[in-house]
Image (tube, rainbow, N blue to C red):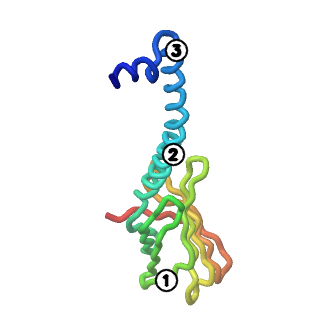
Protein backbone atom coordinates (compact mmCIF):
# COMPACT_ATOMS: atom_id res chain seq x y z
CA UNK A 1 0.00 0.00 0.00
CA UNK A 2 2.89 2.37 0.80
CA UNK A 3 4.31 1.76 -2.68
CA UNK A 4 1.02 2.84 -4.24
CA UNK A 5 0.90 6.01 -2.16
CA UNK A 6 4.48 6.90 -3.12
CA UNK A 7 3.77 6.34 -6.79
CA UNK A 8 0.56 8.33 -6.67
CA UNK A 9 1.61 11.33 -4.58
CA UNK A 10 5.40 11.50 -4.21
CA UNK A 11 6.82 10.41 -7.56
CA UNK A 12 5.73 12.61 -10.44
CA UNK A 13 4.81 11.11 -13.79
CA UNK A 14 4.68 12.33 -17.37
CA UNK A 15 5.48 15.96 -17.97
CA UNK A 16 5.75 16.55 -14.22
CA UNK A 17 8.45 13.87 -14.03
CA UNK A 18 10.53 15.72 -16.62
CA UNK A 19 10.19 19.03 -14.78
CA UNK A 20 10.94 17.32 -11.46
CA UNK A 21 14.08 15.66 -12.92
CA UNK A 22 15.36 18.91 -14.40
CA UNK A 23 14.74 20.78 -11.15
CA UNK A 24 16.53 18.06 -9.18
CA UNK A 25 19.51 18.17 -11.57
CA UNK A 26 19.71 21.99 -11.35
CA UNK A 27 19.51 21.88 -7.56
CA UNK A 28 22.30 19.28 -7.47
CA UNK A 29 24.52 21.46 -9.66
CA UNK A 30 23.92 24.48 -7.45
CA UNK A 31 25.05 22.46 -4.46
CA UNK A 32 28.02 20.71 -6.07
CA UNK A 33 29.64 23.44 -8.21
CA UNK A 34 30.90 25.55 -5.28
CA UNK A 35 32.52 22.46 -3.79
CA UNK A 36 34.21 21.75 -7.14
CA UNK A 37 35.57 25.32 -7.09
CA UNK A 38 36.99 24.80 -3.60
CA UNK A 39 38.63 21.56 -4.74
CA UNK A 40 40.15 23.30 -7.79
CA UNK A 41 41.49 26.15 -5.64
CA UNK A 42 43.02 23.66 -3.20
CA UNK A 43 44.62 21.76 -6.09
CA UNK A 44 46.08 25.00 -7.49
CA UNK A 45 47.53 25.93 -4.08
CA UNK A 46 49.01 22.44 -3.73
CA UNK A 47 50.39 22.70 -7.26
CA UNK A 48 52.03 26.07 -6.50
CA UNK A 49 53.65 24.67 -3.37
CA UNK A 50 54.92 21.65 -5.30
CA UNK A 51 56.28 23.89 -8.05
CA UNK A 52 58.58 25.76 -5.68
CA UNK A 53 59.36 22.91 -3.27
CA UNK A 54 61.95 21.55 -5.72
CA UNK A 55 64.19 24.49 -4.75
CA UNK A 56 64.79 22.88 -1.37
CA UNK A 57 68.36 21.75 -0.87
CA UNK A 58 71.89 23.13 -0.80
CA UNK A 59 73.06 25.70 -3.31
CA UNK A 60 76.65 26.88 -3.66
CA UNK A 61 78.07 30.08 -5.10
CA UNK A 62 80.93 28.86 -7.32
CA UNK A 63 82.90 32.13 -7.09
CA UNK A 64 83.45 31.85 -3.34
CA UNK A 65 82.02 28.65 -1.93
CA UNK A 66 79.21 30.43 -0.07
CA UNK A 67 76.36 28.02 0.70
CA UNK A 68 72.65 28.70 0.78
CA UNK A 69 70.56 25.91 2.31
CA UNK A 70 66.82 26.10 1.60
CA UNK A 71 64.20 24.02 3.42
CA UNK A 72 60.55 24.01 4.51
CA UNK A 73 59.24 25.93 1.50
CA UNK A 74 55.48 26.39 1.72
CA UNK A 75 52.77 27.73 -0.57
CA UNK A 76 52.73 31.12 1.19
CA UNK A 77 56.31 31.81 0.15
CA UNK A 78 57.85 31.14 3.52
CA UNK A 79 61.18 29.37 3.38
CA UNK A 80 63.77 28.46 5.97
CA UNK A 81 67.17 29.58 4.73
CA UNK A 82 70.60 29.05 6.21
CA UNK A 83 73.71 30.77 4.87
CA UNK A 84 77.35 29.76 5.38
CA UNK A 85 80.55 31.68 4.59
CA UNK A 86 81.98 29.11 5.61
CA UNK A 87 80.57 29.59 9.11
CA UNK A 88 76.86 30.25 9.66
CA UNK A 89 75.67 33.81 9.02
CA UNK A 90 72.33 34.82 10.58
CA UNK A 91 69.45 35.00 8.08
CA UNK A 92 67.03 37.74 9.11
CA UNK A 93 64.42 37.19 6.40
CA UNK A 94 63.85 34.80 3.53
CA UNK A 95 60.91 34.46 1.17
CA UNK A 96 59.98 33.09 -2.22
CA UNK A 97 57.50 34.68 -4.57
CA UNK A 98 56.14 33.85 -7.98
CA UNK A 99 55.18 36.54 -10.45
CA UNK A 100 54.65 36.29 -14.20
CA UNK A 101 55.96 32.72 -14.15
CA UNK A 102 59.23 33.74 -12.46
CA UNK A 103 60.31 32.41 -9.09
CA UNK A 104 62.20 34.94 -6.96
CA UNK A 105 64.05 34.25 -3.72
CA UNK A 106 65.03 37.06 -1.33
CA UNK A 107 67.42 36.34 1.54
CA UNK A 108 68.41 39.13 3.91
CA UNK A 109 71.41 38.61 6.20
CA UNK A 110 71.89 40.42 9.51
CA UNK A 111 75.01 39.49 11.38
CA UNK A 112 78.46 40.89 12.15
CA UNK A 113 79.72 42.39 8.85
CA UNK A 114 76.33 41.61 7.24
CA UNK A 115 74.04 44.48 8.34
CA UNK A 116 71.25 43.93 5.85
CA UNK A 117 73.19 42.38 2.99
CA UNK A 118 70.63 40.89 0.62
CA UNK A 119 70.44 38.27 -2.11
CA UNK A 120 67.72 38.72 -4.72
CA UNK A 121 67.73 35.64 -6.94
CA UNK A 122 65.54 34.24 -9.69
CA UNK A 123 65.38 30.58 -10.58
CA UNK A 124 66.62 29.86 -14.12
CA UNK A 125 65.05 26.54 -15.13
CA UNK A 126 67.19 26.16 -18.27
CA UNK A 127 70.42 26.03 -16.25
CA UNK A 128 68.93 24.90 -12.90
CA UNK A 129 70.58 27.87 -11.19
CA UNK A 130 69.61 30.72 -8.92
CA UNK A 131 70.78 33.94 -10.60
CA UNK A 132 70.57 37.53 -9.47
CA UNK A 133 72.27 40.10 -7.31
CA UNK A 134 73.95 40.36 -3.94
CA UNK A 135 73.83 43.70 -2.16
CA UNK A 136 76.86 43.93 0.14
CA UNK A 137 75.63 46.42 2.76
CA UNK A 138 78.99 47.26 4.40
CA UNK A 139 80.50 48.52 1.12
CA UNK A 140 77.14 49.51 -0.44
CA UNK A 141 77.92 47.53 -3.57
CA UNK A 142 75.82 45.21 -5.70
CA UNK A 143 77.26 42.16 -7.46
CA UNK A 144 75.86 39.75 -10.03
CA UNK A 145 75.88 36.25 -8.54
CA UNK A 146 74.58 32.77 -9.13
CA UNK A 147 74.17 29.61 -7.12
CA UNK A 148 74.32 26.06 -8.45
CA UNK A 149 72.65 23.08 -6.84
CA UNK A 150 74.95 20.75 -4.91
CA UNK A 151 74.47 17.01 -5.12
Element at label 2: helix
Query: Mark 1 or mark 2, which is nearer the start of the sequence?
Result: 2
Q: CA distance from mark 2 to mark 3?
A: 34 Å
* Residue on which disc 1 sits: 89
- The image shows residue 90 at horizontal and vertical percentages of 51, 83
Q: Position of residue 34 (x, y in %)?
A: 54, 40
N-term-proximal mark, 3 vs 1: 3
Q: What residue lies at 46% left-to-right and 21% top-to-bottom?
A: 9
Task: State the residue position of label 3.
Answer: 16
Secondary structure, mark 1, is strand
Describe residue 17's horizontal placement relative to residue 113 as left or right: left
Q: Quickly name the residue at label 2.
A: 38
Above or below, 11 relative to 14: below
Residue 38 image position (x, y, % from top left):
51, 45
Distance, label 3 to label 1, CA atoms, is: 76 Å
Q: Where is the C terminus found, in terms of image quarters?
A: bottom left
- Residue closest to the eye, 45 or 1: 1
Which image quarter: residue 143?
bottom right
Dot 2: within a 10 Å radius of its alpha carbon, few (fewer than 14), some, or many (20 or more) residues?
few
Amino acid sequence: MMDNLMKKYLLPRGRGALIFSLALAAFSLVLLLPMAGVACAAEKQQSRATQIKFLEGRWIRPDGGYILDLSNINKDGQVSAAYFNPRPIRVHRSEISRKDGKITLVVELRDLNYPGSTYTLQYDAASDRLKGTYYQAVHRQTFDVEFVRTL
